[in-house]
Image (cartoon, coloured by chain):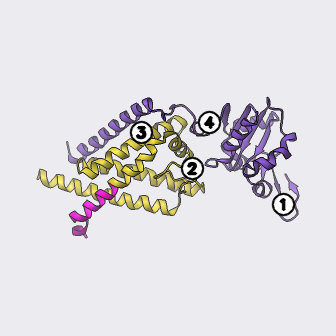
Amino acid sequence: MKKLLGNRWLLLLCRLVLGVVFVYASIDKIQHPAAFAKQVYNYQMLSVTASNLFAVTLPWMELFAGLALIVGVFKGESSLLLSTLLVIFVAAISVNLYRGVNLDCGCFSTAEGGRSIGMLTLAQDVGLLAAGLLVLRGAMLGRHQRAG
Amino acid sequence: MSDWGKTFLGALAIVGCAAAVGLVYNHVSEEGIGLTQHPLQAVSELEPSWFLDTPQAKKKWDEGVTFVDARAEDFYRYQGHIRGAISLPITEFDSAFPLVKDRLPPPDEEIVCYCSGFGCEESTELARRLTKKGYRLVYVYEGGWPEWSEAGHPADVEDAEEGEETG
């Protein structure tokens, strides 16, 4: 199992998938901050100002970290950041699924009537989180080995 | 410093850079938003309009302000509605508005729109349409029916079998 998790091709695949997904996810949000702020606010977890701040800054975090993963620099830092964001996304979706609120996911598109949150979006984020943690583990092990 | 410490600081640095770029971009971009502007207002372009929470909505109700329910009529009848609220489903606005117009207050008096709570769009859209019709003091009660009923405030529901209103 350890050998499989440390397989460099698997790590490369996870890193590229994660990078491409987050770069893609950031573009529409950067272009339409007002619509994204509304989606964030509808999650009912942040105040008005916090929702706006989150909407204005989060897509750039996704873009920077995603690009870094694609290029292959700051792999540990970027995967740590994206994994943390994914934990927040999973928590926000779970809370609203528990509340029974039907919301636009706001995952990739800010268009109204887009994909709603559901078990599928939750599973998607959990899958990405697993990929993120794998990349993080690989980056930290690599760093440790180089230091050693 | 440990590898984890360095990685954590590096991740924070990315957050800082991204936040700085995001804020600057928001400032210079034509699409930029006001950080204190209400997110729902930013999209719906309501003007003038205000968003109410449950205590504020209850206060308006106590003052006798007219409430308008933007949900489909079935929800209004069988799920329940705020007592005294007028049903004006946004999906049938054009045909329903002339029928309820006489029951609405004059355009310079207050109206509160609501729907199925946070995440529903009908009340915001209804407020926008009423504003276009000349109503100047349109509010949106964001918590809508779920929060109102949860708070135990006055409500009516029509019995599906008997078709009667009960308090």
Callout in the foreground (3, 2): 2
Q: Colour of chain A?
A: yellow
Q: Nearer the viewer, residue A14 or A24?
A: A24
Residue A122 position, x and y percent, is 47, 60
Please give the residue where the numbered disc 3 appears in the rendered image. Answer: A57
Mark 4: which secondary structure?
loop
In the picture, measured across the screen, residue B41 lies left or right of residue B127, that is: left
Please give the residue where the numbered disc 2 appears in the rendered image. Answer: A112
Q: CA distance from mark 4 to mark 3?
A: 23 Å
Q: How many marks?
A: 4
Residue B20 position, x and y percent, is 36, 33
Magenta span includes A147: no
> Bounds of the magenta span?
A1-18
Q: Chain of mark 3?
A: A
Please give the residue where the numbered disc 1 appears in the rendered image. Answer: B159
Q: Quadrant of residue B14?
A: top left
Please give the residue where the numbered disc 4 appears in the rendered image. Answer: B45
Inspect the image, locate mark 4, and give the three-letter code of the amino acid beneath it. Glu
- Give the chain ID for the purple colour: B
Callout in the foreground (1, 3): 3
In the picture, measured across the screen, residue B107 lies left or right of residue A44, that is: right
Q: Residue at x 30, y 51 (%)?
A: A79
Dot 1 alpha-carbon crowd within 10 angstroms: few under 14, some 14 to 19, many 20 or more: some
